[in-house]
Amino acid sequence: MGFITRGRGISIHRTDCINILNLPQIERPRLIEAEWEQTDGVTQGEKYITEISIYAYDRSGLLADITKTLSEGNVDILSLNTRTNKQGVVTIVISFEISGREELGHIVTRLRSVGNVIDIGRTTG
């Protein structure tokens, strides 16, 4: 599903996403049908912007390891924001370009192997 955000374009969610399922009735008119374009294995160079949240226990060099992992995967970071709570858990929100779901899956798998990473999730719009 696509959700027309205020000022950030359209964010894409799975139809079973908890954010879509719990969307208030007043916001439902902003939902649209959406799907990834099928390329039949032929890369057409089209890129999609996605945003993920990485949750990790804070440590020295964490951000460097995450950005290095993305760089090694030839991922162009568009924006990055970090914050640490009182319990020492870091939330890193990263926006970047991908070619599709398969590439996103590979990126998330690689990021999960970075030391101290607790969880990774798609960011809501």
Image: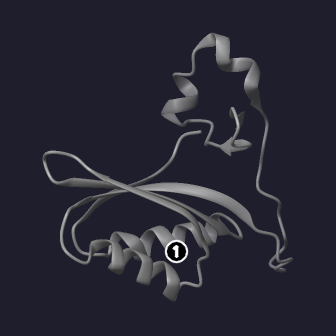
Q: Is residue 94 left or right of residue 42?
A: left
Q: Locate residue 52, reporting x and y percent.
A: 49, 56
Secondary element at image label 1: helix
On-image quarter of the C terminus: top right
Q: Residue at x 68, y 59 (%)?
A: 49
The residue pinned by badge 1 equals 106
Residue 38, by quadrant, is bottom right
- The residue most toward the left is 87
On-image quarter of the N terminus: top right
Q: How many labels does the image show?
A: 1
Q: Locate residue 45, reporting x and y percent.
A: 82, 77
Q: Which amino acid does label 1 sit on?
A: His
Looking at the image, which is closer to me, 17 or 30?
30
Q: Compared to 79, does 29 lie above or below?
A: above
Q: Residue at x 32, y 75 (%)?
A: 113
Q: Residue at x 62, y 57 (%)?
A: 50
Q: Which residue is drawn at 69% across and 66% down?
A: 100
- The residue most toward the bottom is 72
Q: Compared to 16, does 50 lie above or below?
A: below
Q: Locate residue 7, reporting x and y percent.
A: 70, 37
What colouring method underlies this structural image? one colour
Q: Compared to 104, does 75 lie above or below?
A: below
Looking at the image, which is closer to me, 16 or 72?
72
- The residue most toward the top is 26
Residue 62, by quadrant, is bottom left
